[in-house]
Amino acid sequence: MSGRKRRLAELEGMTESSADAELIRHIEKLRRRIMKGPGSALSPRTDPTPEESWELHLRGLTLSLAPRFAPASIDSILDIFVDRIHRRCPGFGPAENQRILDIGANEGFYSLAMCVGRPDMRVVSLEPDTRNYQLLRRNIALNFPRRIETYRLALWDQSVELELSTHPWVNTISSVAIENLDQSWVDPRVLERQRVPALSLDELARSLDLADLDLIKIDVEGAEAEVLRGGRELLSRTRRVVVEVHGGASRRRCTSILRDLGFVLKLEEAGRFGDLYFRRRRGGMD
């Protein structure tokens, strides 16, 4: 059994009905067809209307999926619920954290996973892309509306309006720093643009009156160093940070910034893309 087939089988084992398992298989067939065909076969003109949605029931959660994005959504669901990305290091799961800031929440799968079994969990989830934000709000409303706050907002190292690049049918491609991504298969001619408001992390903390945080998760597709540079005050009141890096330069910049702020690198995932797990140095907040 291939690695992907094994992961899909594990995901099907988490579903609540045969209809859910069949939906996963249907979406996977769509993905295989997409991978075989030219990009033009994915024209949004042939997509279902934005109002249509599919629901996947997974271990007590109801995940709302947009048919247009469903193949990419399944990849994200596999990452979060099967591979446990952003939670692979001891101390970074829901049991050890109660106050979380989710930067780059996409459709909300990580925020939801962190709330399972934790009625006292409080999460602030940020997502700048309009379509992803609609899905995020829908998923939060279906599951934990009292535990998770959502804001359509980007973060940067200062308050500014940014141009966000998005992909018309792969909603995991969404970045204000698209040039920092190594996605050779992405045709820049199909990318769409939207203007989004951005604050620095410290400005966000002041506007929301954020107190000390247990954990900040950052997945912002190439803009992670800029986010960190704007958050020195809040980071000084944060116990743990997990940041997905994109390339060697991003890895070095993020590590340098967080070490200067008193964090220790606890786990570094290999490869061009991967998570870095940081914990505040002993003698600080811990």
Image (cartoon, grey):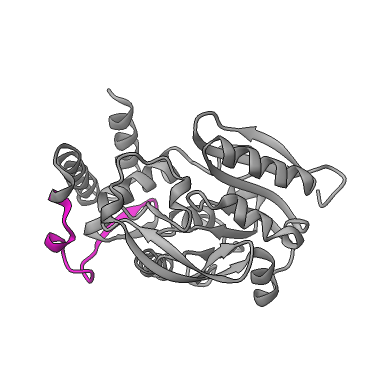
In the picture as drawn, the residue positioned furthest to the top comes out as: 1
User: Image quadrant for the N terminus?
Assistant: top left
Depth order, front residue of 133/154: 154
Observer-nearest of 204 and 138: 204
Residue 256 occupies which quadrant of the picture? top right
Res 91 seen here: no
Query: Relative to 61, does residue 251 appear above or below in the rendering?
Result: above
Q: Position of residue 31 (x, y in %)?
A: 21, 43
Asked whether residue 4 is drawn in magenta, I would say: no
Residue pictured at 41% horizontal, 71% vertical: 141
Q: In this view, does 38 lie above or below 156?
A: above
Q: How many marks?
A: 0
Q: Does the magenta segment cover residue 58?
A: yes
List x then y, in percent, for residue 55: 27, 60
Position of 234 with respect to 149 (left or right) is right
Q: Is residue 213 left or right of residue 199?
A: right
Can see residue 127?
Answer: yes
Residue 169 in percent (x, y) is at 26, 55
Residue 212: where, in percent of width, then height? 74, 62
Q: In this view, does 3 lie above or below 128?
A: above
Looking at the rendering, the stretch of residues picked out in magenta corresponds to: 41-59
Q: Nearer the viewer, residue 57 or 86?
A: 86
Extreme residue toward the right, this view: 283
Name the residue located 31 percent from the left edge and 47 percent from the top edge: 74
Q: In this view, does 264 lie to the left or right of 125?
A: right
Q: Quadrant of residue 269?
A: top right
